[in-house]
């Protein structure tokens, strides 16, 4: 009992002294608060933590709970988000890092935007989306992630040619061209080469709705110098065709592994 009380007091102390972590428009951590769009605060618990996101002006933006599972922290339980005006933006459920059950999304006027059912992080049964005037936009049927059939409609309710719910960003020439462009522009840092430093760097970035790249960061690093070069060379990539969800361009996270090998 005494140990539990000490732990609770420790967690309360950490929460009271919680520091804001500033985030850019894609919720990637940045150090410059003047260009931040959001900030987050982490509240520890005995078996994990709660992550709270806020608009930079102070309004709540999202809330997620993380627990430790298989050696890492993953989402578990209710996932909620809100518009700046305070209305609910989305609600869903995660079970040990995988989305499960019905996810609901809303427009900023409170109107339902979509109903998507998940099983084990895969689309299952039905995806329904709606226009802002409340008319049905899409009704697709899935079986454990596999699309079976569906129908799409315009804002007047007329059936139109079906189009994919999700379209990933596309680079001219595909992934092979990404690899080729990176290899062509990559400069092995001199100090790392001379010291025999090698390694694999996993770079994450966002393809924006106009096809440009932003929020470049390191997910798995090798050394500071190799990480820096990996970020630099990824920023030299050409524009992508943006990703789409339900016919609307959306920002999409993209990952590229870069291996530095001495021969």
Image (cartoon, rainbow, N blue to C red):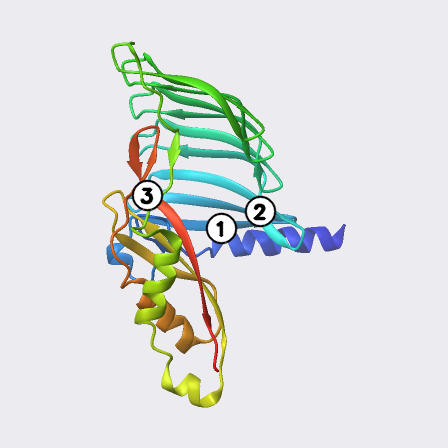
Are discs 1 and 3 less than 8 Å apart at CB?
no
Disc 2 to disc 1, C-alpha distance: 14 Å
* Residue carrying label 2: 74
Q: Tell me whether circle 2 and circle 3 mark residues in contact (CB < 8 Å).
A: no
Give me the residue at 26% from left, 42% from top. Answer: 209
Seen at 41% across and 49% down, the residue is: 40
Image coords of residue 9 (percent x, y)? 61, 53
Question: From the viewer's perspective, is residue 162 above or below residue 11?
Answer: above
Of the pair 21 and 134, the residue shown nearer to us: 134
Which is nearer the N-term, disc 2 or disc 1? Answer: 1
Secondary structure at numbered mark 1:
strand
Q: Which residue is mark 3?
A: 251
Residue drawn at x 43%, y 84% is 192
Circle number at residue 231: none
Would you call the spot at circle 1 few (<14 residues within 10 Å), some (14-19), or many (20 or more)? Answer: some
Mark 2 surroundings within 10 Å by alpha-carbon count, few (fewer than 14), some (14 through 19), many (20 or more): some
Q: Is residue 125 above or below residue 23?
A: above
> Is residue 200 toward the left or the right of residue 25 in the image?
right
- Residue assigned mark 1: 42
Q: Position of residue 115 (x, y in %)?
A: 45, 21
Farthest residue, direction right? 1
Residue nearest the viewer, comparing 187 with 229: 187
Residue ID at (31%, 50%):
171
In front: label 1 or label 3: 3
């Amino acid at each position: 009992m005494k140990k539990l009380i000490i732990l609770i007091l420790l967690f309360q102390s950490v929460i009271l002294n919680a520091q804001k972590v500033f985030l850019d428009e894609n919720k990637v951590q940045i150090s410059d608060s003047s260009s931040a769009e959001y900030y987050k605060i982490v509240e520890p618990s005995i078996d994990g933590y709660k992550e709270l996101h806020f608009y930079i002006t102070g309004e709540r933006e999202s809330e997620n709970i993380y627990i430790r599972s298989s050696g890492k922290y993953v989402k578990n339980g209710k996932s909620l988000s809100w518009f700046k005006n305070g209305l609910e933006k989305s609600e869903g459920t995660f079970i040990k890092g995988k989305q499960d059950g019905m996810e609901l999304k809303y427009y900023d006027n409170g109107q339902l935007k979509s109903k998507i059912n998940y099983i084990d992080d895969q689309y299952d049964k039905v995806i329904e989306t709606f226009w802002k005037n409340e008319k049905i936009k899409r009704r697709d049927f899935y079986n454990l992630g596999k699309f079976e059939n569906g129908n799409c409609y315009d804002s007047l309710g007329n059936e139109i040619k079906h189009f994919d719910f999700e379209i990933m960003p596309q680079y001219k020439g595909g992934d092979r061209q990404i690899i080729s462009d990176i290899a062509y522009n990559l400069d092995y840092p001199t100090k790392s080469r001379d010291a025999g430093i090698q390694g694999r760097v996993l770079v994450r970035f966002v393809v924006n709705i106009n096809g440009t790249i932003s929020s470049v960061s390191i997910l798995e690093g090798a050394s500071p110098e190799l990480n820096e070069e990996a970020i630099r060379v990824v920023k030299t990539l050409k524009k992508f065709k943006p990703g789409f969800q339900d016919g609307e361009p959306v920002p999409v996270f993209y990952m590229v592994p870069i291996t530095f090998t001495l021969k």
